[in-house]
Image (tube, helix red, strand yellow):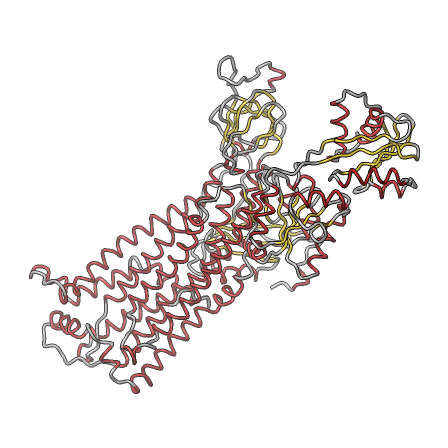
Amino acid sequence: MQSPQTVVATPASPIETIALDVTGMKCAGCVKAVEKQLNQHPGVVSARVNLVTEVAVVECEAGAIDPVALAKEVTEAGFPTQPRLATTAGEKAKEALSPAERHALENRQQLRQLVIAGILIVLSAMGHLNQHFISFPDYLSPLTNIWFHWGLATAALLFPGRQILVDGWRGLRRNAPNMNTLVALGTLTAYTASCVALLFPRLGWDCFFDEPVMLLGFILLGRTLEQRARGRAAAAFQALLALQPKVARLIANPTVTGSTPTGSAKGSDFGGIEIPVEQVRVGEWLRVLPGEQIPVDAEVVAGQTTVNESMLTGEPVPVVKQPGDSVAAGTLNQSGAIAIKATRTGKDTTLAQIVALVEEAQIRKAPVQLLADTVAGYFTYGVLAAATLTFLFWYFIGSQLWPEVTMLSAVGIESHSAMHHAIGMGGETPPLQHSALLLSLKLAISVSVIACPCALGLATPTAILVGTGLGAERGLLIKGGDVLERVHHLNIVVFDKTGTLTTGHPIVTDCWPIGNFLPESLLQLAAAAESGTTHPLAEAIGEEAHRQELTIPLAHEFYTEPGLGVSALVEGVRVLLGNADWLTQQGISLNDSEQNQAQQLASAGKTVVYVAADGQLAGLIGVTDTLRPDAKATVSRLRQMGLRVMLLTGDHLEAARAIASQLELNPDSDVLADVRPDAKAAAIAQLQAQGQHVAMVGDGINDAPALAQADVGISLQGGTDVAIETAQIVLMRDRLLDVVKSIQLSRATFNKIRQNLFWAFAYNTISLPVAAGVLLPTFGLVLSPSAAGALMAFSSVSVVTNSLLLRKSLSTDN
């Protein structure tokens, strides 16, 4: 394995990611074995494997590993693996099955095995029914013959149970025993002991050929139900994958050819060439008809329509699109034919990024799973040791301390066994000896079968699969199990003000000239100086100048100081715009009257823009940004959830306090004002240094450093690359209340993880001692191997089912 010093990413050795589809994993022990196999390969930095999605994500040194060779190594270790290679134009992975096709094939195979096992179980139970409940006619007597039941057990092992036995042996041989190893040892031990009893009847041993048959039947039943439940858990993600269009209709530039689509079919040229969507290039023109999916991220250049974006944002109301508007791949064109110009294709589209994000989220493990992973790595060895100790105890000690337990363990079996011997061997029934060896074997088999590493392995990934899939349906993208756990520990939510709590579209409300300046001339100077920047305040001033139909002078020599202000040369006059600190740095002072005017604007909750010309204050401009309609409700809901809400802004304290009062926040303790953009991350770090767990909510662009610094970064309007890279939760809808819903979903998902892990540990903690016979001396209760197999299957199914209940518990949310 690589030493820590050799896996640090440097410019000389960048890190790349390889995805592998891995099959054959049955439990957490298998996951641990695959991760160990991958991590041992030279050049691998880290490997994460998901049991539910059957995907391995390997981080390695760029160019150091051949994915095909790596997949071959894992395959040789007993887990069939193939690299997930990106297909280029015209390329198809014909020889490799897609994950959906592979799962469908596995479902059909398991269903066939289940039918066979079900028939064997019914036939195996015939002897019990005849002995205790129903008297069969003479022509059905062969069904109760001991040799017939030997044949059933043999058939069960050779056909539906063959794969379990083979995989169990492979795991044992490669020093990585798994769940199949435990089941194989249990069934083979029961079968062998029964064969000895059949061939040597004078030993007086019981024949329990029904045990391996019942055991395999319950195992296959449980796995089939588990596979179906896992399929339902992955349904949301599969639906997301299904959104990806397959073809696009390429057309010539309609502005050149003169064919311009309209909102209806009449009079429109619907020609074009259908090509695979992978072949579309940025800048090419495409036509999309009503009822078709948008093939790539694009800009509408002709036509008008409504687009259903609910599959990406969760917002059910269609959005009107006209020339100049952007559309996203996978969304549904509803009402009109449009021509679009491709802006992002392939893996760069919003949909592809969301799919990659959700898939990555399902791989990332919660720290709480580390305990389960650690236990899983040694689980099978521990169970084998427990089974061995159980056998040794009852054979050498237990049967001597409580000799009556051999009688108790044989209740309901003696007459059945004697009947089989009499019918099968044609002689008198030998006296049955209640053997301590048989009792010890049965208990050891039950111990090996009832233990369930599957439940441990499924506890976290199934909950994350359901939670992230449910979030993707609702436009809430959560980046994995580690994020869920951090959300659970949050106690402070910090909101950026502009564009987050507010609409992000400020308007000019006041224009106070000083000296000889008129309001119009002051606004003209300000708009000219701000024409060199795209700051929201600059846009507000420019919009107000255009609204008043003012002529904006030409400006040049622009300079911007982030968080402070701008300067420009306007018709030979040096104009400065910004906050009070910016003017102070430039040597411009304010008298008492000017300061009082600024104070009045700030006290009213307005941002004050100071304008100076030729070294003198020329006036003050008041700008306000209204709160989002759902801002107050969002803050109130978060506080009801026990979270402290704070406001972070670059505005002056007075303006920030005015906003805080509207939100019913404490203006003294819950407001961080006068914070420059480059200092926002430091402000978050200061809260963390006080022992707080902080979430930062911002727009994902200006707030990127703070989003990255926070324990959980939450980005609004997350269709941007910056948001996806920096935030841990990305909200696709422009709704502030989704902050509340994302935290609720994260908490609910993490609670499911904890419930699943608790059940998995509790099940094994309680069931193992019972299977080992702890209740036998006092209560006469003992689990048969088949009952142990049924309980083991139930534990896995219950964990997956509990994860599926997450959808039901959140079904009332919008």
Task: Give above or below for 84 relative to 130.
Answer: above
Residue 98 in the image: state x and y as whole percent. 45, 44
Task: Give above or below for 337 relative to 454.
Answer: above
Residue 313 in the image: state x and y as whole percent. 54, 38
Q: Residue furthest bottom?
A: 400
Q: Residue furthest top?
A: 267
Front-lying residue, 446 or 629: 629
Task: Tell me: 553 left or right of 271.
Answer: right
Quarter assignment of residue 773: bottom left
Q: Residue furthest left?
A: 138
Residue 556 in the image: state x and y as whole percent. 86, 29
Determine the residue positioned at 48% across, 27% down.
Answer: 292
Determine the residue positioned at 79% across, 42% down.
Answer: 563
Front-lying residue, 9 or 781: 781
Quarter assignment of residue 508: top right
Determine the residue positioned at 49% across, 55% down.
Answer: 50
Quarter assignment of residue 588: top right
Quarter containing the N terminus = bottom right
Task: Tell me: 416 left or right of 291.
Answer: left
Residue 708 in the image: state x and y as whole percent. 67, 50
User: Is residue 212 in view from this perspective?
Assistant: yes
Task: Give above or below for 250 relative to 382.
Answer: above
Front-lying residue, 91 or 422: 422
Determine the residue positioned at 55% across, 18% down.
Answer: 261
User: Is residue 565 in view from this perspective?
Assistant: no
Task: Tell me: 770 left or right of 260.
Answer: left
Task: Tell me: 624 left or right of 389.
Answer: right
Number of labels in the image equals 0
